[in-house]
Amino acid sequence: MKLPMLRIKNGDLYLTILMGIIIAFATLIPADKLPETLGTDKLHHLVAFSAFVLRVGLMRPNRGRVILLTALILGGAIELIQPYMNRSGEMADFWADAISAGLGILLGKRIAQMTKSSQRRKFANFDNAKFSRCSSFAIRCLCCTVAANNS
């Protein structure tokens, strides 16, 4: 049975929320269960928080302050909670989050200025199959992380 093609309005917001959940989960894993990764801690913060805000910065360039505030609250909350999760909360990580969120928003705004609104809408709107693949991939990543941490 073929599902009807549904357009998911505000797909940029849904993916940003999903990304925020993934970032929170990944940064609150206890230190003794962290997998070995390439790059430095600050590079991970740069990539994660830039990706977190980029899509909304691109699709809603006039909402940059709101998404920046959201990223700052998320980054601050993570750094406050980390000491209770056998991790170290560092002010430098918070600043890395803040700087990378600002860079992500600026990059999104710049790309928005360079592209037509129809191209941006095409980028933001998902049909149900694309959204399902994206969300199932994120859920599989979370499940694999949980399974690896429990073993």
Image: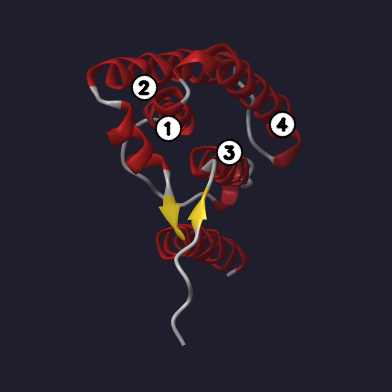
Distance between the alpha carbons at the discs numbered 3 and 1: 12 Å
Q: Position of residue 1 (x, y in %)?
A: 46, 87
**Mark 2 or 4, closer to the camera:** 2
Residue denoted by label 4: 83
Looking at numbered disc 2 in the image, what kind of residue is underneath it?
Answer: Gly
Q: How crowded is mark 3: few (under 14 residues within 10 Å), some or many (20 or more)?
A: many
Distance between the alpha carbons at the discs numbered 2 and 4: 33 Å
The first of marks 1 and 4 along the sequence is 1
Q: Which residue is rendered at x = 68% and y = 40% of the image?
A: 86
Distance between the alpha carbons at the discs numbered 3 and 4: 19 Å
Looking at numbered disc 3 in the image, what kind of residue is underneath it?
Answer: Gly
137 or 63, nearer to the observer: 63
Kindly check if marks 2 and 4 are in contact, taking CB atoms under 8 A apart as contact.
no
Q: In this view, does 24 lie to the left or right of 128?
A: right
Residue denoted by label 3: 20
Residue denoted by label 2: 108
Residue denoted by label 1: 55
Q: Which residue is rendered at x = 68% and y = 33% of the image?
A: 82
Q: In this view, does 87 lie to the left or right of 145?
A: right
